[in-house]
């Protein structure tokens, strides 16, 4: 069963006509929150999973896909009260995108130990330009 976790908010920003986006996830609660690490871009912009969506477009994820077992606490990043996680990703590096304008958003499911209740975390949409003139 999935249900929203109001304490977590994801925002996506883009600095203009580029394929770089910055994801920020903030814990707005007074308790710890957990994020499944492989459903996050790493702090150096590496993606282990296709966690970005492109509206009606379905570009192929170019990263390595792996089957995973049940989520363990070691698979999670703990965000303390008021803490945030931030990473910048070059979308064009991780998806097979033709030149053009795209609306992109972050969307991933995170499993929270110890109950392993899955929740969807979705950001706002940002416009990115791939190749060609902005």
Image (cartoon, rainbow, N blue to C red):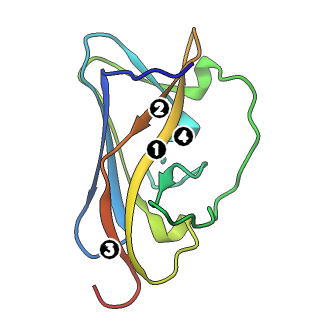
Residue beneath label 4, please?
Answer: 39
Question: Residue pushed farthest front?
Answer: 56
1 left or right of 23 in image: right
Q: Can you tell which mark lies on residue 107?
A: 1
Point out which mark residue 120 bears: 2
Q: CA distance from mark 4 to mark 1?
A: 9 Å
Q: Which of pointers 3 and 2 lies earlier in the amino acid sequence?
A: 3
Mark 1 or 3, nearer chain start: 3
Estimate the spatial distance between the alpha carbons at disc 3 and disc 4, rounded to whole Å. 23 Å
| Alpha carbons under labels 2 and 1: distance apart | 7 Å
- What residue is shown at x 48% (from left), y 55% (from top)? 53
Spatial separation of the CA atoms under disc 1 and disc 3? 20 Å
- Point out residue 131 in the picture as x, y percentages from the top left corner: 41, 85
User: Label 1's element?
Assistant: strand
Element class at badge 4 = helix
Q: Is residue 117 above or below residue 102?
A: above
Q: Report the disc number at residue 18.
A: 3
The image position of residue 75, as x and y in percent, is 60, 27
Question: Which of the two discs, 4 and 2, sits closer to the camera?
Answer: 2
Viewer-proximal residue among 102 and 46: 102
Q: Counting residues from the N terminus, which is met first, the one under dot 3 or under dot 4?
A: 3
**Label 3 Cα neighbours within 10 Å, binned few <14 / some 14-19 / many ≥20:** some
Mark 2, secondary structure of its residue: strand
Q: CA distance from mark 4 to mark 2?
A: 11 Å
Q: Give whichever of discs 2 and 1 has the lower sequence position.
A: 1
Residue 127 vs 113, above or below: the answer is below
Q: Are marks 2 and 1 in contact (CB under 8 Å)?
A: yes
Work out whether mark 4 precedes mark 1 in sequence or the reverse, and give the earlier one.
Answer: 4
Name the image quarter holding residue 83.
Answer: top left
């Amino acid at each position: 069963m999935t249900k929203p976790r109001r304490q977590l908010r994801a925002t996506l920003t883009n600095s203009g006509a580029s394929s770089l986006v910055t994801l920020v996830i903030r814990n707005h609660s007074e308790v710890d929150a957990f994020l499944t690490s492989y459903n996050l871009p790493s702090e150096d912009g590496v993606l282990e999973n296709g966690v970005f969506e492109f509206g009606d477009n379905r570009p192929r994820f170019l990263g390595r896909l792996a089957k995973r077992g049940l989520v363990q606490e070691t698979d999670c990043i703990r965000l303390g009260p008021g803490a945030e996680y931030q990473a910048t990703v070059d979308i064009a590096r991780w998806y097979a995108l033709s030149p053009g304008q795209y609306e992109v958003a972050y969307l991933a499911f995170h499993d929270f130990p110890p109950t392993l209740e899955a929740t969807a975390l979705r950001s706002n949409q940002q416009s990115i330009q791939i190749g060609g003139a902005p």
